Image: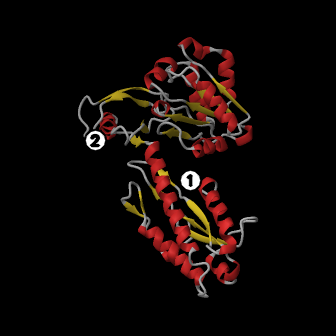
Amino acid sequence: MPPSRPHSETPRGWIIPIGGKLVDEEILDRFVVLCGGPTARIAIIPTASSEPDIGTFYERDFLRHGVAQAKSLHFERRSDCDDRDWLEWLGTATGIFIAGGNQLKLTATLGGTLAAKLMRQRNAAGVHVAGTSAGAAFLSEHMIAHGDEGATPRAGMVTMCAGLGLTNRVIVDQHFRQRDRLGRLLTALAYNPFAVGLGVDLSHFYLAKTEMQNAADAAALAGASALTLPNPDRITTAVNRAVDLLNTNKYNFNNKSFGVDRGKLCGTGEACVTFAENLDDITYMSEAAARSNPDKIRFIKVTTPSKPVSVIFASCSSSMATCASPSTSAARTASVALRRARSCSRSM
C-alpha cells in the first residue's frame, strides 16, 4: 500500500529502521525522546517474533527508559487486527515500535488490515514508527521477503512482497554487512528502480562508535599529558597533542582517517577540544579561554568529528572523552573522570 497523505498542519512522523538486535541503549533513548519522553505512549508490535514474551520484554524496556505507557499489541491472527480496544490504543500512541523476527509473518498478518491502515495514517499525522530487523524491512512499500547472500546481484536472487507502506521511496535490508546482503538489495533495486536502497547494520554502527570512542579516549589522554608541563603554552600543546593523536587513529574497520583540521576545531560537525577546572560544576571552556588561566585547568575533553560510517546510508555523529591532568593531587579525580567518560560522557 502507498503511504497515507500527510496532514497539512503536521509534518509526517519519522520512519526509523534499526539494523538488528538492540545492543545500544542510545537508540531506544533517542526514539523515546522523539515520541515525547516522559509523556510517550509506545505501541509495540511483536507479531514477527517467535518468542512469546518479546512483547512483555519491550514493555518493560520502554518503561525503564521513562515512557508514560507501553503496551504490546499481540496481532497474531488477521482477526486480531480488528480488535477495537487495540485499535483505539494504537490510535492514541505517540510512537510505534515493530519488533524483529520473520517479516513474512508481519505482512501475512497485518497486510491490508485496519491496523496497518491506522499505522500509515498515524505516521502521516506525525507519529514516529521504528522497526528493528524484520520490522525495519516491513516499513517500506516494497519489502524484501527473503533472498540469497552474496555481493553480486543476479536474477532470482531476491523475493519481494508488499510491506507496511510508510514510504515507497526506500527499500530496506537489515543485518546488511554481517550477512553479506548487498547483492540481494541491488537486485531488489533493479526490480524497483524508482526506490533507493537502504542497508542498515547495527553491528557496523556499533563497531564504528567503539573505534571513535577509543580515538577520543586516546586523544584526551595525550592532551592531558601536557597540562602539567612548565611550558606557558601548555594549553596549545595539549590541543596539538590531542589533534595529532586523533589523526593517527582510524575508524570504519580501521580504514578511514579523521582528517582533523587544527584551524576548524569546534566548528559544526568538526572535532572539538575543550577544558575544565573541575568536574563538580562542569563548564567546559574554549582553548582561548583556558589559555588565560592555564594553572587552574585540570581536565580536557575531546570530541571526534561527525563522520559517515556505513556501506550505504547511516552515520555516527561523534564520540567524546574527558581526562584529567596526571598530577598527584588529581590522580583520584582522573580515575573518576575516565570512568565518567566511558559510561556517561559520550555522544552519538
Left or right position of 285 against 318: right
Q: Amino acid at mark 2?
A: Ala
Q: Quadrant of residue 126?
A: top right
* Residue in front for this viewpoint, 159 or 339: 339
Q: Does residue 276 appear left or right of residue 195 in this picture? A: right
Name the residue tied to disc 1: 348
Q: How many marks?
A: 2
Residue 285 visible at all: no
User: SS at mark 1?
Assistant: loop
The x and y percentages for residue 183 are 29, 38
Q: Position of residue 324 (x, y in %)?
A: 63, 69
> How are the residues colored?
secondary structure
On screen, residue 251 versus residue 71, left or right, reads left
Q: Which residue is mark 2?
A: 151
Q: Position of residue 241 (x, y in %)?
A: 50, 76
Q: Which mark is residue 99?
A: none
Q: Amino acid at mark 1?
A: Met
- Quadrant in the picture for residue 73: top right
The residue closer to the viewer here, 54 or 15, is 54
Q: Residues within 10 Å of mark 1 (few under 14, many from 20)?
A: some
Do we see residue 158 in this rendering? Answer: yes
Q: Residues within 10 Å of mark 2 (few under 14, many from 20)?
A: some
